[in-house]
Amino acid sequence: MNKSVWKPYVFWILGVEAVGALSGFLTRRGSELYSQTITKPPLSPPSLVFPVVWGILFLLLGVGAARIYLSPASPERSRSLLAFFIQLAFNFLWSIIFFNLQKFGAAFLWLVALWGLILWMILSFRKVDPPAACLQIPYLLWVTFAAYLNLGVWVLNP
């Protein structure tokens, strides 16, 4: 791969990772309070697991978005990038709703909407670049697991 092809990958990966880092920074106090005071459901992983998993998922998101961006211009490509940005915004805001506001019911509903947006993104990506869509499957699976955890926290912490 020549040097110019790598630039969009670096841009998209760093951009997505920056969104994740900003989200983590803005919710660090809420996250600390959560880990100290909230009753968690069974199968809750240690707190250290979350930044590692999200770092990998954001990497995959960035690679997928770069692949879509590098695809020939088309209405499908435009819809895919729109789906990408909308789900990324929903992802970013979920952390604030869950950790900072501790509105666990609202966060669960937000996460269900995010799950639908991720599915829309995957289906859109598949029309443009099937490998980019496949890279998003771990993200959908993780958000499915996150929905279980969110629902458990909501039920256990009325």
Image (cartoon, grey):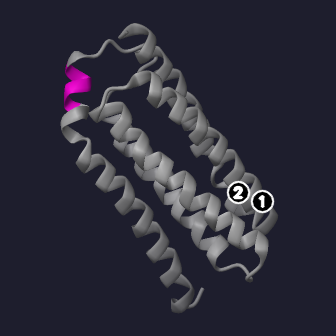
**Visible residue check, residue 136:** yes
Q: Residue at x 76, y 53 (%)?
A: 123
Q: Secondary structure at mark 2?
A: helix
The quadrant the C terminus occupies is: top left
First in sequence, mark 2 or 1: give its number: 1
Q: What amino acid is at disc 1? A: Arg
Q: Residue at x 40, y 68 (%)?
A: 14
Crowding at dot 1, Cα within 10 Å, few <14 / some 14-19 / many 20+, comes out as some
Range drawn in magenta: 32-36
In this view, the residue in front, 120 or 43, is 120
Most common SS among magenta residues? helix
Question: Residue 134: x and y, percent?
Answer: 70, 54
Question: Residue 96: x and y, percent?
Answer: 34, 40
In this view, the residue in front, 130 or 96, is 96
In the rendered structure, find residue 151 and report the number of the disc placed on it: none
In the rendered structure, find residue 133 and report the number of the disc placed on it: 2
Left or right: 145 as drawn, with respect to 94: right
Q: Are the two marked residues, 2 and 1, in contact with CB atoms closer than 8 angstroms?
A: yes
Q: Residue at x 70, y 57 (%)?
A: 133
Crowding at dot 2, Cα within 10 Å, few <14 / some 14-19 / many 20+, comes out as many
**Residue 52 against residue 131 in the figure, above or below:** above
Give the labeled residue for mark 1: 126
Q: Residue at x 35, y 11 (%)?
A: 157
Determine if the magenta segment contains residue 134. no
Question: Residue 112: x and y, percent?
Answer: 59, 33
**Residue 133 against residue 67 in the figure, above or below:** above
**Residue 54 against residue 3 in the figure, above or below:** above
Q: What amino acid is at disc 2? A: Ala
Left or right: 98 as drawn, with respect to 8: left
**Visible residue check, residue 42:** no
